[in-house]
């Protein structure tokens, strides 16, 4: 049964949600509110002033094109693991937890303390014992990084790259392959890697060669401007994806996908979401 496609709230329901949202944002901007989107019966604790929370609360969904791609292309098998790198408050982590419930596990990485707290809350709120929240960044080596904190209106734009002004906090960094090995998942089939880390994708995936080699599907944010501003050449990310044997597609409006070559991807200057499938 389809789960990503659903009826949007009625006009009266949108008005009611909008009114509740505005009151919460006006009088309790730093206090989490609970949203009930129309996806898999999930609930989410979110901050009313944040972009992700605002979308889930008011529209009942977030990034519907990506959900459509996930619904059409994700294949889940017993013993699978899914990896959510840059999990934020757990939108994809909880969806993946539901889809893998009784079949596999989800490892969700979110280094920012407040986001990680909401991630853990949302995992518990939905009773997802198969989802583990890990408070660290993915990188090519174990160590410490500085996470540059973006303003509270979009808590998904924090980055270890200097792409915006803001104060920084020290965060631990780990290799994905090491994290999986420690959890007894070093040989587990990988159903999905989803990664959205504001331009740091290449460095994060350098620490996951074994995971990528057995990964069937990846959802990757392509941010060439952010990468260059952080001193990373976009070709580094393209090399990882194509070198791992993926067939790469650009995700368009409504969840449409179009296959691209390595050269076509490198010629894509704007930020895009990528669907990578095993060739």
Image: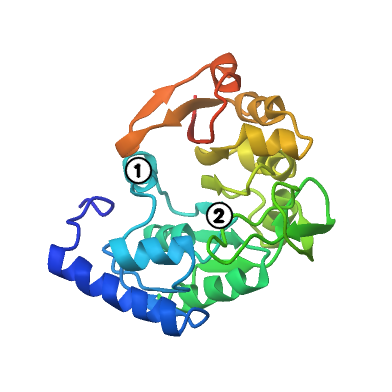
Q: Is residue 92 left or right of residue 43?
A: right
Label 2 sits on a secondary structure element that is strand
Residue that badge 1 annotates:
65
Residue 204 horizontal/vertical position (percent): 70, 45
Q: Nearer the viewer, mark 1 or mark 2?
A: 1
| Count of numbered badges drawn on the protein | 2
Q: Is residue 182 left or right of residue 20?
A: right
Residue 161 horizontal/vertical position (percent): 74, 47
Q: Is residue 220 above or below residue 15?
A: above
Extreme residue in the front direction: 26
CA gap, disc 1 and disc 2: 17 Å
Q: Is residue 234 above or below residue 171?
A: above
Q: Is residue 65 visible?
A: yes
Extreme residue in the right direction: 143
Q: Residue at x 83, y 55 (%)?
A: 142
Q: Is residue 45 above or below residue 88?
A: below
Q: Residue at x 50, y 52 (%)?
A: 80
Residue that badge 2 annotates:
84
């Amino acid at each position: 049964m389809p789960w990503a496609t659903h009826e949007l709230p009625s006009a009266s329901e949108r008005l009611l949600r909008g009114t509740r949202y505005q009151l919460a944002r006006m009088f309790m901007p730093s206090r989490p509110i609970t949203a009930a989107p129309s996806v898999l019966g999930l609930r989410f604790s979110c901050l009313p002033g944040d972009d992700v929370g605002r979308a889930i609360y008011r529209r009942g969904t977030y990034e519907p094109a990506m959900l459509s791609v996930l619904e059409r292309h994700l294949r889940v098998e017993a013993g699978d693991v899914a990896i959510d790198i840059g999990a934020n408050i757990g939108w994809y982590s909880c969806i993946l937890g539901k889809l893998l419930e009784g079949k596999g596990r989800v490892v969700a990485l979110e280094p920012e303390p407040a986001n990680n707290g909401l991630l853990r809350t949302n995992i518990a709120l939905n009773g997802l014992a198969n989802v583990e929240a890990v408070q660290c960044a993915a990188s090519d080596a174990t160590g410490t990084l500085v996470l540059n904190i973006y303003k509270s209106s979009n808590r998904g734009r924090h980055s270890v790259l200097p792409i915006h002004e803001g104060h920084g906090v020290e965060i631990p960094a780990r290799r994905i392959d090491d994290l999986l090995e420690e959890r007894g998942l070093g040989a587990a089939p990988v159903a999905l890697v989803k990664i959205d880390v504001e331009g740091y994708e290449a460095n994060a995936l350098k620490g996951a060669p074994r995971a990528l080699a057995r990964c069937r599907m990846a959802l990757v944010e392509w941010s060439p401007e952010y990468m260059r501003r952080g001193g990373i050449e976009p070709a580094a990310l393209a090399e990882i994806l194509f070198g791992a044997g993926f067939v790469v597609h650009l995700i368009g409006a409504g969840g449409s996908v179009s296959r691209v070559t390595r050269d076509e991807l490198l010629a894509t200057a704007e930020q895009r979401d990528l669907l990578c499938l095993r060739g």
